[in-house]
Image: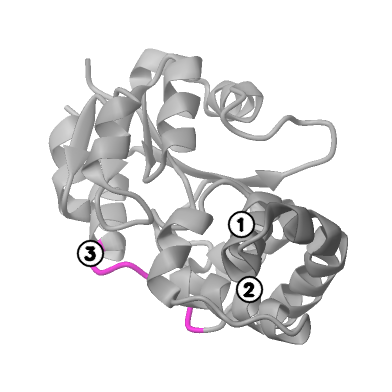
Amino acid sequence: MKKKAAIFDLDGTVADTLESIAYSANRTLEALGLTKRPMKEYNYYAGDGADVLVMRALKAACGDEKRAQELFKEAQAKYKEIFEEYCMYHVKPFDGITQMLDGLKAQGIKIGVLSNKPHERTVVVVNELFGERYFDLVCGQKEGIPKKPDPSGAITMLEEFGVEPTECVYVGDTNVDMQTGKNTGMFTVGVLWGFRDREELVNNKADAIITHPLDLLNYID
């Protein structure tokens, strides 16, 4: 069945935010007197929301879960403060993303972003990177709507697009993304340029796994 819409995760899928996330989290750790973590570790700390990211980084830096729990609220507030100031620090589209989006637009595909990042911040990042050229809908975390992998946000986007789940692809880089697509009944495409690896995508039953953004165009027809 030819697809009529595509919904994308933001961080690690269309936007390379790893350096930005690591920078803000490491500044948070240093502010608490802890040693910063190597950037590569943030591939596994990130992808499940800011609170989970902060706790994972704290546990690694403290080496002690109890101490991490004690510092969590302070770290949570500090990370939010730093990240809001530096949310676009070295953030950029992944190579090939704009060409892929051009290809989708040329076929009349409706395009959306669904992120667990707060809505206002999601809009800022998308507009800074892409303007209003590509995305018909941009949806971050809003009060009263459960976070992914709950399907509520994705279902709302499908309704606004006027398409059925089987007419849409869901594209992301983590277990949460694959679960979101599956919970909604969409065709799920896992990407290998983001936070996680092939094993995680396979274990979460990705319908397809791609290594370059342009490969997505093969799954639209």
Residue type at mark 2? Ala
Q: What element carries label 3?
A: loop
Q: Is the magenta stretch mostly helix, strand or loop?
A: loop
Residue 177 is left or right of residue 76, and the answer is: left
According to the picture, the residue beneath numbered tag 2 turns out to be 25
Q: What residue is rendered at 66% in x and 64% in y? A: 58
Answer whether labels 1 and 2 touch (C-beta < 8 Å).
yes
Answer whether labels 3 and 2 touch (C-beta < 8 Å).
no
According to the picture, the residue beneath numbered tag 1 turns out to be 53
Q: What residue is rendered at 52% in x and 28% in y? A: 161
Image coordinates for residue 17, horizontal then vertical, percent: 48, 69
Residue stretch rendered in magenta on the structure: 90-96
- Counting residues from the start of the chain, the first of labels 1 and 3 encountered is 1
> In this rendering, is residue 200 above or below 23?
above
Q: What residue is rendered at 52% in x and 21% in y? A: 162
- Distance from label 1 to label 3 (Cα)? 27 Å
Closer-to-camera residue (97/180): 180
Image coordinates for residue 112, horizontal then vertical, percent: 49, 43
Within 10 Å of disc 2 (Cα), the crowding (few <14, some 14-19, many 20+) is many
Quarter of the image for the N terminus: give it. Answer: top left
Image coordinates for residue 150, horizontal then vertical, percent: 62, 24
According to the picture, the residue beneath numbered tag 3 turns out to be 96
> In this rendering, is residue 21 above or below 187?
below
Q: Is mark 1 on a helix, strand or loop?
A: helix
